[in-house]
């Protein structure tokens, strides 16, 4: 499954606010983690992006548990 390196809005890792091509310096970009294409948080993040950006990104898969 495809994995994305992301930054969350806080330590609770509830909301993705950015995505990266690789792991970043934690001092500069705190609250990093990774998610897979079927993570519901990735779906929420993806759906909040403009369509022009969505076209260049991996589409979300069916969320786990559904």
Image (tube, rainbow, N blue to C red):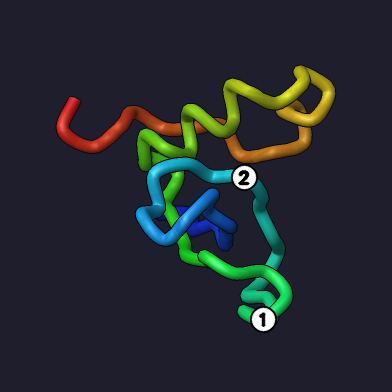
Q: Residue furthest top?
A: 51
Quarter of the image with the N terminus is: bottom left
Quarter of the image with the C terminus is: top left
In the image, residue 58 lies at what x, y percent? 61, 39
Q: Residue at x 62, y 75 (%)?
A: 23
Q: Residues within 10 Å of mark 1 (few under 14, many from 20)?
A: few
Structural distance between the alpha carbons of marks 1 and 2: 16 Å
* Count of number-bearing discs: 2
Q: Secondary structure at mark 2?
A: strand
Q: Is residue 62 left or right of residue 16?
A: left
Front residue of this view, candidates 12 and 59: 12
Which circle's residue, 1 or 2, is located before the other in the chain?
Answer: 2
Q: To which residue does mark 2 refer?
A: 17
Front residue of this view, candidates 40 and 15: 15
Among the 4 quarters of the image, the one containing residue 7: bottom right
Among the 4 quarters of the image, the one containing residue 40: top left
Q: Is residue 1 left or right of residue 30?
A: left
Q: Is residue 4 left or right of residue 57?
A: left
Whether residue 52 is situated above or below residue 32 in the rendered picture: above
Front residue of this view, candidates 49 and 9: 9
Q: Secondary structure at mark 1?
A: loop
Q: To which residue does mark 1 refer?
A: 27
Q: Residue at x 66, y 49 (%)?
A: 18
In the image, residue 14 lies at what x, y percent? 39, 44
In the image, residue 47 lies at what x, y percent? 58, 22
Q: Residue at x 77, y 21 (%)?
A: 50
Q: Residue at x 57, y 62 (%)?
A: 5
């Amino acid at each position: 499954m495809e994995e994305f390196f992301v930054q969350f809005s806080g330590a609770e890792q509830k909301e993705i606010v950015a995505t990266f091509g690789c792991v970043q310096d934690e001092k500069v970009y705190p609250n990093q983690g990774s998610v897979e294409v079927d993570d519901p948080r990735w779906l929420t993040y993806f759906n909040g992006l403009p369509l022009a950006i969505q076209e260049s990104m991996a589409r979300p898969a069916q969320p786990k548990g559904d």
